[in-house]
Amino acid sequence: MDSLWEEDFTSSEDQQVVEDLRERMRLFGLDPSQVEEFVKRAKLPTIRKGKASEAFPVQPQREWEEAKKRLYEQGQRLAKLLLNHVELDMNGTEIPYKYKALKLVGRSNYICALMMVNNAIHERLGKSRDEASTEEFQTILGSLDDILQPLVRKLRKVKGDYERRQA
């Protein structure tokens, strides 16, 4: 066999992001029918043909793309871990509606957690992901715990403050 076909499938997280973007487009008075196309264009092609035993790419551009994609995937993973640490459901709405001190707007806890993680990554990079180098992506990927722990503490504090006010 000389080639391998890969295909990505949409997940419930992708659908949540699409729904959130669709709602935001409506709020801004824009046409929300284009949202799915925007998300598809932003992602890499879903069906790819590659060599059957393709090694890790050594071309600088491919290596950069892989590091950027890995950072994106790890950001989603960190958002889920953040919610697990503070015992919140992905589809819940506590973060956007109860924990207003965080000043996050999203349709669900997952989207808000993803916003928190991406904001922390952006602060670490100090620039846009398109301007970052492969080495900077590697540095961030090597220090994911340093990103997660402060976010967990921050979210636990806001959750505790809210629960004390409600008691």
Image (cartoon, rainbow, N blue to C red):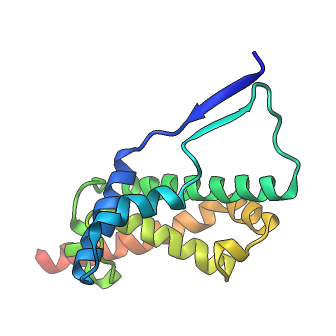
Q: Is residue 142 left or right of residue 149?
A: right
Quick one: which residue is furthest to the left in this view? 167
Res. 163 visible in picture: yes
Between 119 and 18, the one lying in front of the other is: 18
Q: Position of residue 112 (x, y in %)?
A: 36, 68
Q: Quadrant of the N terminus?
A: top right
Between 112 and 161, the one lying in front of the other is: 112
| 44, above or below 6, in the image | below
Q: Residue at x 79, y 63 (%)?
A: 134
Q: Quadrant of the C terminus?
A: bottom left
Res. 110 visible in picture: no
Q: Residue at x 59, y 76 (%)?
A: 122
Tell me where residue 4 sits by quadrant: top right
Between 18 and 72, the one lying in front of the other is: 18
Quick one: which residue is furthest to the top in this view? 1
Tell me where residue 86 sits by quadrant: bottom left
Q: Residue at x 72, y 76 (%)?
A: 131
Q: Position of residue 115 (x, y in %)?
A: 43, 71
Q: Is residue 109 left or right of residue 164?
A: right
Q: Position of residue 139 (x, y in %)?
A: 75, 64
| 115, above or below 123, in the image | above
Q: Is residue 84 left or right of residue 135?
A: left
| 51, above or below 13, in the image | above
Q: Position of residue 28 (x, y in %)?
A: 27, 84
Q: Residue at x 52, y 70 (%)?
A: 118
| 53, above or below 17, in the image | above
Number of on-image labels: 0
Between 82 and 117, the one lying in front of the other is: 117
